[in-house]
Amino acid sequence: MESAIYKIKDIPTWAYDFALGEWCDVSSSSTAHTGSKPLGQDLKIATFNVLLDQYDDKVYHPHFLYPEDRYQAVADELAKMDLDVICLNECTKTCLAIMEKQDWIQKSYYLSESTKNGCESLGYRNFGNCIFSRVQPHSFQTLTLAELKSRPVILADFSVKTSRNSNESFVVAATHLTARTGNHPRRARELTRLYEALDKNFSSHDHYLILGDLNFHAEHERSSIRFDYQDIWTALYDLEEHPGYTWNAQENLMSRQIWPVFENRKMRLDRILYKAKSVDHSFEPKKMEIFGNKPIYNPEDQKSRTGLFRMLGNKMGDLFTKNLRDKEEYLYCSDHYGLWVNFHA
């Protein structure tokens, strides 16, 4: 489906074929697995910006970001969470290759992309969005917005049997909007175009999820959330008591390895927006949490290294040695934290 403001394209659904020992397009494999989502149970969905390791043809901060360590830590974190749908932002070929090797992913999940496919759906800058689903999708699609051509939104369209023995349909949009504080008008336009695309192409669905790094740098950007969608975190929690920061440079030392000396912000860059078409449905968001907010190594040691002196030391290390400190002193899974939500059936 094409318009002047967006283009939707079907892409393959990938599953692991144990007989062949490789990931296969399910349309051409008769022996690939068929998923493992129990019917009539809760639905648990997560989003995580895992921090790219390259863009265009450039390796991103190769001296101190240790992508193999980080992406394996991401996989280990996700494996513990019993997730039905996983949405990743800033996924790269390196990240996807590590995820594809995980036994728990091979046994149970359908992928929107595979390294075997050349990672085309990740976008022409070599990083983008990816979905892993334990529920077999009717389809995966790319949604390319006219103002966000470099990283297409990835859509998963699937149905889940409820405890009332009825089927309810979902469309999940793994989304990464334009970055930088001053670009909030552009983000609002991108989100408006996304609403329009979902309205037109999935009008019969019961549940709609837009999730990922929406890059909301301030709470006033909530005004771009359309009236029929809810920001699930604010629906479940009081921001005064549970601010829900997914970017916390005061805590995450790795973010200060990357960004300027005085990066000290705390923001809810990542969101999960939800719309139910009617009140008569079986699934409701009941619980939501942050994950990936602990350092990979030596967490207690890291807590003592958050002062200004240490922060300045980090940037001096960037300038002169590019590796002043060992990774055990600062490495997190990402400069973002992840979010998961549980829909009670």
Image (tube, rainbow, N blue to C red):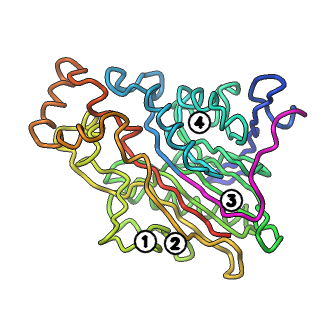
Q: Give the mark nearest the N terminus, 3 or 2.
A: 3
Mark number, residue 234: 1
Along the line of sight, which residue is nearer the eye, 286 or 193? 286
Q: Secondary structure at mark 2?
A: strand
Q: Nearer the viewer, mark 2 or mark 4?
A: 2
Mark number, residue 132: none
Residue occupied by mark 3: 171
Residue type for callout 3 = Val
Residue type for callout 4 = Leu
Residue range (magenta): 30-46
> Position of 148 compared to 17: left or right?
left
Quarter of the image with the C terminus in it: bottom right
Q: Secondary structure at mark 3?
A: strand
Q: How far from the left and from the top, in percent, is residue 344?
A: 63, 69
Q: Secondary structure at mark 1?
A: helix
The residue shown at (45%, 55%) is 214
Q: Give the mark nearest the N terminus, 3 or 1.
A: 3
Mark number, residue 230: 2
Q: Nearer the viewer, mark 3 or mark 1?
A: 1
Instruction: Kindly check if marks 2 and 1 are in contact, taking CB atoms under 8 A apart as contact.
Output: yes
Residue type for callout 1 = Thr
The residue shown at (67%, 49%) is 7
